[in-house]
Amino acid sequence: MLIQFKKFLLVIAIVFANLINPVYAGDKDPLFINLSSSEAHRSKMAIGLGKNNMERGHPLTIFINDQAVLIASKKLTSKYADHQQMIQQIHQQGGRVYICKMCMDQYGMKVEDLVEGVEPSNSMKTSEALFLDNTKTLSW
């Protein structure tokens, strides 16, 4: 009786295991990076990882918010030259780099302060990128 019950449980487990779709990154799944850190090393890792994956075929959106908005300021090019160069390359290669307008206001930034390739965002643009089917997200 106990052996039959164990076999029954095994069959149930196999049936349910086959109903669950595994989660994996497909070859072309979009990547959404939420970047809130202005710390030079952390933010460079985030932008670089996004750029590398975009070059492997993953559509990329970087959403710059909170203190990270400083990275996108022309006034801080001396501090963030590598970051800004990668942002411009991402833009030129078809990636999207959005920046939080409310965060810009918080840090006294204006649209004319932004490096090429960075676009002020709104909830619609951000949501469209974030909720694309199969989008993977990372946050720094």
Image: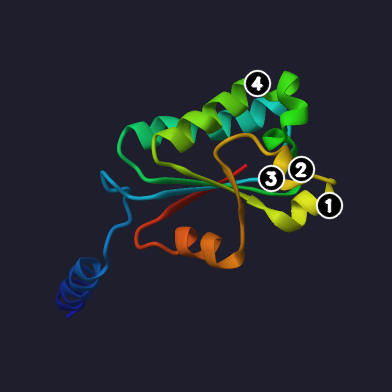
Q: Which of the two marks, 2 or 1, is nearer to us in this view?
A: 1
Circle 3: element type: loop
**Label 3 vs 4, first from the N-terminus:** 3
Would residue 70 be found to the left or right of residue 51 on screen?
A: right
Q: Is 15 placed above or below 24 here? A: below
**Label 4 vs 1, first from the N-terminus:** 4
The three-letter code of the residue at mark 2 reads Gln
Q: Which residue is mark 1?
A: 106
Near mark 1 (Cα within 10 A), the count class, few <14, some 14-19 or many ≥20, is: few
* Tag 3–tag 2 contact (CB < 8 Å): yes
Circle 1: element type: helix
Instruction: Identify the mark at residue 67; answer none if there is no mark.
Output: 2
Q: Position of residue 45 (x, y in %)?
A: 57, 29
* Tag 2–tag 1 contact (CB < 8 Å): no
Dividing the picture into quarters, in which one does residue 117 lie? top right
Give 5 or 42, whichever is nearer the viewer: 42
Circle 2: element type: helix
Q: Residue at x 26, y 43 (%)?
A: 27
The three-letter code of the residue at mark 4 reads Ala
Q: Which of the two marks, 2 or 4, is nearer to us in this view?
A: 4
Q: Residue at x 70, y 34 (%)?
A: 71
Color style of the picture: rainbow
**Label 3 vs 2, first from the N-terminus:** 3
**Label 2 vs 4, first from the N-terminus:** 2
Q: Which residue is mark 3?
A: 36
Near mark 2 (Cα within 10 A), the count class, few <14, some 14-19 or many ≥20, is: some
Q: Residue at x 33, y 56 (%)?
A: 23
Distance of mark 3 from mark 2, alpha carbons?
Answer: 6 Å
Would residue 25 be found to the left or right of residue 116 on screen?
A: left
